[in-house]
Image (cartoon, helix red, strand yellow):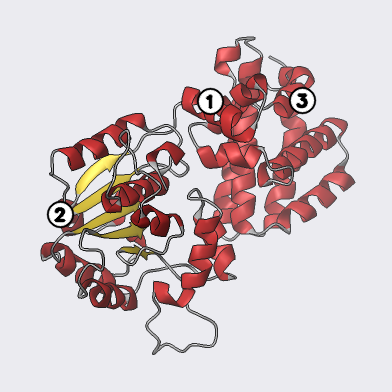
Amino acid sequence: MKFSDVVGQEEAKQRLRQMVAEERVPHAMLLCGPQGSGKFALAAAFASYLLCRNHVAGDSCGNCPQCSMTARWAHPDLHFSYPVIRPAGTGSEHKMSSEDFASEWRGLLSQGPYFTMDKWLAAMGAANQQALMGVGESDLLLRRLSLKSSQGGYKVVVIWLPERMNAECANKMLKILEEPPRQTVFIMVCEEPERLLDTIRSRAQRIDIRRVDETSMENALIERRGIDPDAAHRIARAAGGSWLTALEELDADNEKRQFFDMFVSLMRLAYMRKIKDLRKWSDAAAALGREKQRRMLAYFLRLVRENFMYNFHDPQLCYMTRDEENFARNFAPYINEANVLEMSALMNRAMRDIGQNANAKIVLFDMATNIIVSLIRKP
């Protein structure tokens, strides 16, 4: 993993290089930023840079034995800590740790350094379990760090989503950070730093990672994915600074394409006032599961906003894919100042009710029938 593999984030890369050049690498770092910004990719690239013995043009060489091992995620001085579920067939006495899912983790990393918690949960085969870091993880880390560096340089620990540590694990991790082993660097990759212990945050140097800028994302789509410039420009704008979102747009079976089809179907059925078909639509949407329903409604809210802004005929105001814009050409006039707030309120209320475990079929059907009334409002 090299800095050149990270999409954008040139300012953060330069700051990390400068730390090494000036020999002031902190023992604990906190990389904070939104999902899809490349925090983990940046942490992995910096870990490789610290372990590499032959830097070339401000990056890991990619050829030395250290780089060969980190490329396979098999360097003995590179450790990963991450949230896990309780393994199947184990009881409450088992102290779960990242060691339980090491092969699944390496399999996920082999697909690339950009991934979500949902993808990790799927890799572990989690049904409705939440991934956490327990005391077993901090105990495992203590054992690993008690050993000397096998290569005589840094020992690097990348902790993905430390905010998921439970209280016992967090307190033990605090003791490790207070008295870190010699030449050990902790890189914590965090999305919700406010959930971390204040004492842990105070012992780490925080670096805020911004969303990926549009130009870097557009260039990466063209150069790495072979996308034509117009499509790359649209995807980069619609992605909102998330490389993960951009990659999802390239997947023919991605979740957002499914949501787009459901939005189109909902609006057409509501416009034609097909109550029975709207009932079937609600039943189908209710089968998606609560978390997916909430993501679907968040997507619907975005499309309502985009269709409203499309009426101003200013391309700089709209962030839509080609398919979304093709639909908006005819549909956008039906989202206007007379109903945009009402329709947004309907979807926000549905999202709230589903989050509070209301019956999804009733909530979604109620929203769908009320959209019929909203669509007939004229400015």
Residue shown at 21% from the left, 59% from the top? 153
- Mark 1 or 2 closer to N-term? 2
Give me the disc on residue 279.
none
Residue shown at 51% from the left, 29% from the top? 217
Give me the disc on residue 203.
2
- Mark 3 or 2 closer to N-term? 2
* SS state under label 1: helix
Residue shown at 72% from the left, 56% from the top? 286
Q: Quadrant of the C terminus?
A: top right
Residue 9, given in percent of the width and then of the height, sits at: 38, 33
The amino acid pointed to by label 3 is Phe
- Rounded to the nearest angstrom, the CA distance separating label 1 from label 3 is 27 Å
Residue 169, given in percent of the width and then of the height, sits at: 27, 72
* Residue 305 vertical position relative to residue 287 in the rendered view, above or below: above
| Other residues around mark 3 within 10 Å, as few (<14) / some (14–19) / many (≥20) | few
> Which residue carries the number 3 mark?
327
Q: Is residue 248 visible?
A: yes
How many marks do you count on the picture? 3
Do labels 1 and 3 touch, CB within 8 Å? no
Quadrant in which residue 359 is drawn:
bottom right
- Rounded to the nearest angstrom, the CA distance separating label 3 from label 2 is 51 Å
Horizontal side, residue 366 vs residue 346: left or right: right
Residue 311, given in percent of the width and then of the height, sits at: 66, 13
| Other residues around mark 1 within 10 Å, as few (<14) / some (14–19) / many (≥20) | some
> Which residue carries the number 1 mark?
219
- Rounded to the nearest angstrom, the CA distance separating label 1 from label 2 is 37 Å
* Residue 313 vertical position relative to residue 376 in the rendered view, above or below: above
- Mark 1 or 3 closer to N-term? 1
The amino acid pointed to by label 1 is Asn
Q: Is residue 356 visible?
A: no
Which residue of the protein is positioned furthest toward the left in this rendering?
A: 179
